Amino acid sequence: MSPDEYDDDTSAANHDNDNDDDNNDEHEVEEALEEALELDTQSQIFLEMRRQNLDLLKIATQVAGYSGEHSPLKPADVKTALRGIWDIFAEFYMWIDPEEAEGDEDDSDEDED
């Protein structure tokens, strides 16, 4: 038997495996960062949409006449006030995003059946 057959020096092979592991680790880190960035972007879009909805709701409340200085609503008037605000909000929302509003109307038609 030759000395090469029992050569335990596999450092070159181990070194190549280490490089492969490093490359895989770097690739996994890059993928994780990309996913985190995508989630952050989606979160920012979601939060921006919610902020716009709140702004629109504030405007609807003002148009309906329920903002500013006035006495608190009576319990019997709350439902009417909320219905009026919601109707104005829905109309504004339909102007801003007609496609989304059409989808909501389809959903409400299904709920009534």
Image (tube, rainbow, N blue to C red):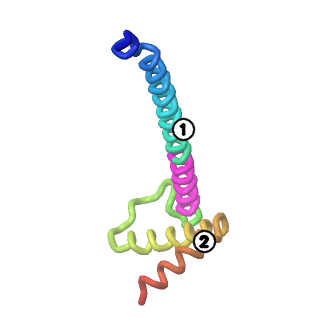
State the residue in front, 27 or 98. 27
- Residue 50 forms part of the magenta stretch: yes
Say which residue label 2 marks: 91
Task: Classify 17 as above or below 79.
Answer: above
Label 2, label 1: how far apart the Cα atoms are: 38 Å
Residue 22 falls within the magenta-colored stretch: no
Q: Is residue 9 left or right of residue 34?
A: left
Count of numbered tags = 2
Decide which of tag 2 and tag 1 comes sooner along the chain: 1
Residue pictured at 35% horizontal, 68% vertical: 74
Q: Residue 112 or 29: which is nearer the viewer?
A: 29
Q: Amino acid at mark 1?
A: Glu
Q: Nearer the viewer, residue 3 or 85?
A: 3
Q: x%, y% of residue 62?
A: 56, 60
The numbered dot on residue 34 is: 1
Q: Secondary structure at mark 1?
A: helix
Residue found at x 42% / y 19%:
14
The residue sitting at 40% across, 13% down in the picture is: 4
At numbered mark 2, what does the secondary structure look like: helix, strand or loop?
helix
Q: What span is in magenta?
A: 43-62
Q: Position of residue 69 (x, y in %)?
A: 49, 54
Q: Could you classify mark 2 by the number of other residues whose Cα lies within 10 Å: few (under 14), some (14-19), or many (20 or more)?
A: some
Amino acid tagged 2: Glu
Is 111 above or below relative to 98? Answer: below
Viewport quadrant of the C terminus: bottom left
